[in-house]
Every structure is written in structure tokens, then in C-alpha cells.
Image (tube, rainbow, N blue to C red):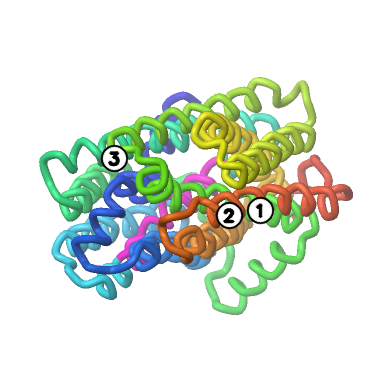
Amino acid sequence: MRKMFVLLGALTSAGPLAIDLYLPALPNLAADLGVSASAAQLSLTAFMVGLGTGQIIVGPLSDAFGRRRPLLIGLAAFAVVSVALTVARDIEVLIALRLLQGLTAATGVALTKAVVRDLYSGVEAARFFTMLMLVTGFVPLIAPVAGAQLLLVTTWPGLFATMAALGALLWLTALVALPETHPKDARQASTIRSVVRAMGTVARHRGFLSFTLTAGCASGAMFGYMAGSSFVLQEVYGLSPQGYSVMFGLNSLGMILGGQTAGRLAGRVRMKVLLGIGLGVSATAGLTVLVGVVTGAGLPVIMPALFAVVAGQGMIYPMALTLAMSSQPPHRAGSASALFGLVQWVAGGLTGPLSGAFGTGTALPLALIIAVLGVAACVTAFLFTRGASDKQPVASV
């Protein structure tokens, strides 16, 4: 399991790194291209939408053709598009290329989840997903810091060159080390009709839909924070790019802490209970952020609350993902991973621009997004997951 964790952890890092590496550069990018903060954030939105919709394509394809070949093609394309982004000097071209970059990065994000479902189930899968939270938490910990430091010696296009180099390295790693985990005799027919039918079967499953929608609301709050915090904390509260990257990294430690706590308790505490704890922590902290902004309490209140928001996410994501994926048999793992990812990333992509839609001189839009969606995740869980089971489906379903 340890070797597979290292491999899958590396392969799943392309998506998070392509988001977090250039967060400190968003204000510089906006100024360099002469566009508004909201327009600059659309480049982040485009990537997230691409990351979500790309999984709808690659997930079912991997059910039909295996996991390895689509992953290798996607990683190669990610490296090529990242090179193209280094020469983009128009916001419309940049947004279009970021959409394409997200589509290619979707292979790593979707197929690592499918590989885990191929190999593990139940509590074992939950523990593996919480181990992957180390990567999900560690990349935001180091990527903004690395991006801020790179900005001392290069401009924002240099960050895309770094992504291109990473994509090439990941492609080589997958080529050498990734086995095929979805054997031919377990693959589904590859006709359009069969793909649509499989996706429809997954989407209509109450348990899968319940946990996926809950995680979608929580992801909207998380990505709203990711997209808006660089502007709010630097332009409203006066942090430097380096100071912001340190704060962002410290908050990512909260995600690691939440994820590892959930992983250690899985098997002793029901996963739905752990999911509820994460939702409660994140929603309460989101409301605290809103109160801190409205009352003018400032960073002494807002920063600890943001830490708690992210820590709660560390519990929400692996538990919701495990429960959603475990509701489906292994032969539909690609389709399930694709739909789960689509909801998470599209929700995140849609909330991103809202945090800067009313300008960068106020933190209120960001605070509202975090608070409202945090509460919405709790309400969704209460209304829709009560009848959903923690148990595994019958494999032949």
C-alpha cells in the first residue's frame, strides 16, 4: 500500500499544484494583463471547470479501456498545454488554455480515485483516501510558498513552465511505475450508449448522489476561499505575497490534521459520523469568518477561523468520497469518480469569481461564500444522507 500511495499521491498532485502554485501571482497577473480581479479569477474558474468536465470524459473511458493509457495521454497533454500557457499574453487566450489545462489534468485526479476503488474498499479505502489527503494538504502547503519565491526570480509565465516540467516528470513516473489495475475482463462496453447508461445509473443512486452533493457544497466554500483569499488577505488586510503564502500553507496543515484524524478514527467511528463532525466544524468556522468581517474584528478572528474551515474540509472530503465511491461496484469506479469530481470542481469553479465580483476592497463576498455554503453542506447532509448506507454494494450490481 505504501508504494502505491507514493505513486498515486504524485499522480494526483498535478491538479492541486496547477491551482495553488500561481495563487500568489493572481494580483500580478491581473495588473500585467490590465484586467480586473474577477477576470483574473476566471482563469482559475476555467481550470476548475475543465478539471470537473474532463473527468466526465476520462472516467467512463477508463472503465472501457483501462486506467493506464488514458492517464499517460492526459499527463502528456498537460505538459504541452502548460508550455503554451507560458506565451499567453491575452486574458481570453489564457482562460481558454487554462480550461484545456484543466481538461488534461482531470486524468490524474479522476483515475487515481478509480485506481483506489479498483484495489481497496470500505475502511481500507477510507484510510487510503485520508493518506492521499496528505498530498491534497501538502501541495497547498508548499505550492503557494514555492510560487511566491519563484516570483522573486521570474514572472507569472515562469510558474506555468514549472507546471510543464512537473507534467513531464509525472508522465515518465506513470510510464515506468503504474500498473494496469482494471483488467480487460472487468471492462465495460465503450459505446456512447453504454457510457451514458453507466453514468445515469451512478447519478440516480441515492447514496452516491447524497454524499456527492454534500461534498459539492463544501467544495464550493473551499474553492471560494482559495480563489478569493489571495486578493482579500493581500489587498484588504495588507499581507505580502510571501506572508499570504505562509498563511495559506499553515491553513493547509489544518487540512492534513483533519484528514489524518479522520483516517485514524475510521473503523472505530462510523464514516457518516466523521463526515458530520467535519461539516459542523467547517460551517461553524465559516460563520465565525462572516462575523469577524462584519464586525471588523480583523485577522485575529478571521485567520484562526479560516484554519478551522480548512481543517473541517480535511475530514469532509475523504469521508464523503469514500462513502460515494463505495456505493458503486468496481466496474463503475471510473464513472463514479468522474461524476464526483465534476460536482466538486464545477462547484468550486462557479464560486471562485463571486469572491471578487464586487471588487477587491471588501472581504464580505468571500465571507458570505464560505459561511453560506458551509451551512448548505450541513443542510444537504441532514436532508439527503440520512437514508444512505455506509455499507458496500454487491460487486455484481
Residue pointed to by mark 1: 373
The answer to which of 235 and 150 lies nearer the viewer is 235
The quadrant of the image that shows the C terminus is bottom right
Q: Amino acid at mark 2?
A: Gly
* Between discs 2 and 1, the one toward the N terminus: 2
Q: Position of residue 212 (x, y in %)?
A: 68, 54
**What label does residue 79 carry, if any?**
none
- Report if residue 93 is visible in the image: yes
Residue at x-position 70% and y-position 22%: 265
Residue pointed to by mark 3: 241
Judging from the image, what secondary structure is the residue with disc 1 in? helix
Dot 2, how many residues are within 10 Å of its Cα: few (below 14), some (14-19), or many (20+)?
A: many
Residue pointed to by mark 2: 220
Callouts 2 and 3 close, C-beta under 8 Å = no
* Between discs 2 and 3, the one toward the N terminus: 2
* Between discs 1 and 3, the one toward the N terminus: 3
| Above or below for 110 versus 350 | above
Q: In the rendered image, which quarter is residue 17 located in?
A: top left
Residue at x-position 63% and y-position 55%: 216
- Report if residue 64 is visible in the image: no
Q: Which residues are magenta?
A: 98-116
Residue at x-position 44% and y-position 34%: 135
Q: Nearer the viewer, mark 2 or mark 3?
A: 3
Q: Amino acid at mark 3?
A: Pro
Q: Nearer the viewer, mark 1 or mark 3?
A: 3
Q: Is residue 244 magenta?
A: no
Determine whether, in the image, residue 51 is placed left or right of residue 172. Answer: right
Residue at x-position 45% and y-position 52%: 228
Judging from the image, what secondary structure is the residue with disc 2 in? helix
